[in-house]
């Protein structure tokens, strides 16, 4: 069955159902649990369209760029082999995808975007953001329309991602070095916890400003799966394929929205238990 997918608030494209939503694969990164793209085949199988909601590969991280590029090509080939159309949305680790960074289902009642635009500084826990908050404010000054215009807000999020991208280290750093990276500056852990706890309310606020017709907002980015009902809106986070986070799947089919766990047993990834079902 085919359905219309509204891309970036304007043009509609006809795509096939069921539409499956995944995010934060981080292909090629040393901390991603995906070692072999072929292990994703059971998760892709049966989908008419797969929306990859940001941070699919490591566009900005030079130590992982080559391997990540190879795995991305393998992922595209796998989806093609399974007969699944693909929609790639920009994330803060891969801001170079075309389009403006969101899609809509159910005539705008469901919005899908990566999630880094929910917070003023994109990733409040990042060391580069914490030590260069003045630069974030300067970028906002350069994009005044971002306060009320969704296209400009997503454009700004991409710019913040590029200009304040994380410094990535190749494998081989000691435990002490990795621990130091995680706790310095000291407010990093607090900012991460704050982001986890407030992503529901921030998601509802984001919809009020930019997508007032939206009833559901689907994001990733925070590596913390869950669902929250805030101000009459349902905010859903699909988690990540990076430890210690758990990855979830979302599926839209014939007016039904499903959310469930991704089963990662037997070195394969497949749809696991359904957690929630909503009817539109």
Image (cartoon, grey):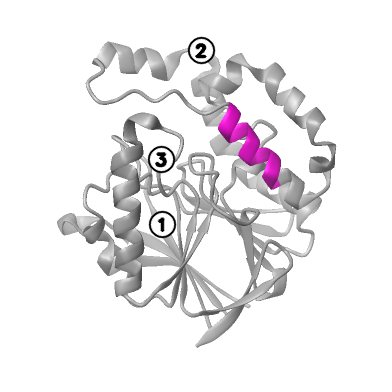
Q: Regarding mark 3 in the picture, which secondary structure is present there?
A: loop
Q: Residues within 10 Å of mark 2 (few under 14, many from 20)?
A: some
Q: Position of residue 187 (x, y in %)?
A: 55, 16
Please tell me which of labels 1 and 2 falls first in the chain.
2
Considering only vertical position in the picture, is 250 above or below 182?
below
Residue in the image at 63% along x and 17% along y: 132
Q: Earlier in the sequence, mark 3 or mark 2?
A: 3
The region drawn magenta spans: 154-163
Disc 1 to disc 3, C-alpha distance: 20 Å
Pick whichever of labels 1 and 3 is earlier in the sequence.
3
| Residue 158 locus on image (x, y percent) | 62, 40
Q: Is residue 193 left or right of residue 153?
A: left
> Quadrant of the rendered structure where residue 176 is?
top left
Give the answer, above or below, for where 167 lies relative to 99: above
Mark 1 residue crowding within 10 angstroms, few (<14) / some (14–19) / many (20+) = many
Nearer to us of marks 1 and 3 is 3
Residue closer to the observer: 62 or 42:
62
**Residue 248 numbered tag:** 1
Image-quadrant location for residue 147 = top right
Q: Secondary structure under badge 2? A: loop
Identify the residue at horizontal 73%, vertical 28% (top origin): 139
| Residue at the image point whose x is 20% and y is 57% from the top | 265
Vertical order, 249 against 168 (above or below)? below
Marks 1 and 2: CB-CB under 8 Å? no
| Secondary structure of residue under mark 1 | strand
Residue indicated by mark 3 = 58
Mark nearest the camera among 3 and 2 is: 3
For residue 269, say whether it is visible: no
- Left or right: 153 in relation to 102: right
Q: Which residue is mark 2?
A: 185
The numbered dot on residue 36 is none
Q: Is residue 121 above or below residue 3?
A: above
């Amino acid at each position: 069955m085919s359905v219309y997918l509204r891309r970036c608030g304007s043009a509609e494209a006809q795509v096939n159902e069921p539409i499956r939503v995944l995010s934060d694969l981080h292909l090629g990164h040393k901390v991603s649990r995906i070692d072999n793209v072929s292990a994703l085949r059971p998760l892709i199988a049966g989908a008419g369209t797969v929306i990859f909601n940001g941070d699919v590969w490591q566009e900005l991280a030079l130590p992982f760029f080559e391997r990540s590029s190879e795995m991305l090509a393998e992922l595209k080939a796998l989806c093609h082999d399974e007969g699944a159309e693909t929609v790639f949305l920009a994330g803060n680790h891969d801001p170079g995808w075309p389009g403006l960074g969101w899609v809509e289902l159910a005539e705008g009642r469901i919005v899908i975007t990566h999630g880094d635009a929910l917070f003023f500084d994109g990733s409040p826990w990042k060391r580069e953001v914490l030590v260069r908050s003045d630069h974030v404010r300067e970028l906002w000054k350069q994009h005044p329309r971002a306060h009320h215009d969704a296209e400009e807000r997503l454009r700004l999020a991409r710019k913040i991602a590029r200009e304040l991208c994380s410094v990535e280290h190749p494998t081989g750093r000691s435990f002490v070095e990795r621990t130091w990276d995680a706790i310095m500056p000291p407010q990093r852990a607090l900012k991460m916890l704050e982001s986890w706890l407030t992503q529901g309310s921030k998601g509802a606020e984001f919809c009020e400003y930019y997508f007032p017709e939206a009833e559901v907002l689907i994001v990733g980015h925070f590596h913390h799966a869950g669902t929250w009902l805030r101000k009459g809106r349902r905010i859903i986070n699909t988690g990540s394929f990076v430890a210690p986070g758990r990855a979830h799947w979302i599926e839209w089919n014939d007016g039904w929205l499903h959310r469930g766990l991704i089963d990662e047993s037997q070195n394969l990834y497949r749809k696991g238990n359904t957690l929630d079902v909503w009817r539109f």
